[in-house]
């Protein structure tokens, strides 16, 4: 998972970061930090977290103000020393609410809850949150032509021809998709059946898919040898 900690108290931010990095409940492969409304908004312009650990009272605004700028709001865990905010926090469908000073046991319990929710969502994921400049978009599964990996990054290419960075791995995404709609044709591409335009024979009894919109490179459409039989079955189902 990718996380953002928004906390203006250095000691609290450092403690939470240490807890998240040294627990075994959830794998956080990227954690960023901000200490103000302004710095958090700047990070969120180019970063889509799976969860935000959000201080309610910031020096230049509130956590609620930050969430109000996000459409749709990101999953959030509120951090505060003031319990009177609990009712308003509830209106944002928060994953949890942690009061200061932080208690490791309470955080572990909350992470267990988030982990269970993540596994459930992974089995049924039908929408994908991406950023477009200062906006956030929620793409339907049917709006995605294909996912493709390039280096350490994963991209979504939409049916309409737009490309978005997505914070996950191809393997994890492939497991969460409807197998009737998507097929992982090789180690770098997971393809929507509706994006298949043509299939050509390739050298060595291989197959190559022509997609609409087209792949950035033609060779991205080559079906892995080990997947040929399953690919043909998928196209014929």
Image (cartoon, rainbow, N blue to C red):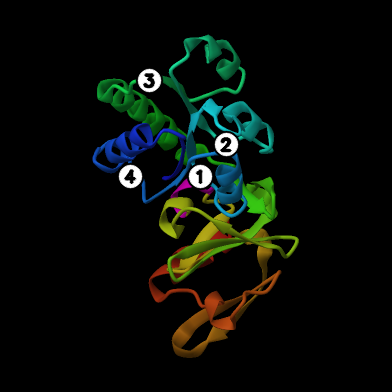
Q: Which quarter of the figure has residue 27?
A: top left
Res 27 label:
4
- In the picture, measured across the screen, residue 100 lies left or right of residue 35, that is left
Mark 3: secondary structure: loop
Mark 4 vs mark 1, CA separation in Å: 13 Å
Mark 2 vs mark 3, CA separation in Å: 22 Å
Is 153 above or below relative to 72? below
Mark 2 vs mark 4, CA separation in Å: 18 Å
Q: Nearer the viewer, residue 87 or 188?
A: 87
Mark 1 vs mark 3, CA separation in Å: 23 Å
User: Which residue is disc 2 drawn over?
Assistant: 74
Mark 4 vs mark 3, CA separation in Å: 24 Å
Q: Residue furthest right?
A: 160
Q: Is residue 36 visible?
A: yes
Can you tell which of label 1 and label 3 is closer to the viewer? 3
How crowded pointer 2 is (Cα within 10 Å; few <14, some 14-19, many 20+) is rated as some
Res 100 label:
3
- Image marks 4 and 3: residues in contact by CB distance under 8 Å: no
Give the quarter of the figure containing the N terminus: top left
Is 191 above or below relative to 127? below
Count the numbered circles shown: 4
Q: Which quarter of the figure has residue 85?
A: top right
Q: Earlier in the sequence, mark 4 or mark 1?
A: 4
- Image marks 2 and 3: residues in contact by CB distance under 8 Å: no
Q: Earlier in the sequence, mark 4 or mark 3?
A: 4
Q: Earlier in the sequence, mark 1 or mark 2?
A: 1
Percent position of residue 233, x then y: 51, 62
Res 49 label:
1
Q: Is residue 191 visible?
A: no
């Amino acid at each position: 998972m990718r996380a953002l900690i928004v906390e203006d108290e250095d000691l609290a931010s450092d403690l939470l970061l240490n807890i998240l990095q040294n627990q075994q409940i959830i794998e956080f492969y990227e954690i960023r930090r901000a200490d103000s409304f302004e710095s958090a908004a700047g990070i969120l312009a180019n970063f889509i977290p799976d969860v935000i650990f959000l201080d309610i009272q910031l020096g230049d605004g509130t956590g609620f103000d930050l969430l109000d700028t996000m459409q749709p709001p990101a999953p959030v865990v509120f951090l505060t020393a003031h319990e009177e905010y609990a009712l308003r926090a509830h209106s944002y469908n928060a994953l949890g609410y942690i009061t200061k000073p932080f208690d490791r046991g309470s955080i572990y319990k909350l992470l267990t809850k988030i982990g269970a929710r993540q596994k459930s969502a992974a089995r049924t994921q039908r929408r994908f949150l991406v950023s477009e400049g200062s906006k956030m978009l929620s793409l339907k599964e049917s709006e995605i032509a294909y996912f493709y990996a390039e280096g350490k990054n994963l991209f979504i290419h939409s049916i309409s021809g737009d490309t978005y960075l997505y914070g996950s791995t191809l393997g994890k995404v492939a497991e969460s998709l409807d197998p009737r709609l998507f097929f992982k044709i090789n180690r770098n591409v997971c393809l929507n059946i509706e994006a298949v335009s043509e299939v050509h024979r390739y050298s060595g009894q291989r197959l190559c898919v022509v997609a609409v919109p087209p792949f950035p490179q033609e060779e991205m459409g080559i079906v892995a040898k080990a997947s040929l039989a399953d690919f043909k079955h998928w196209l014929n189902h």
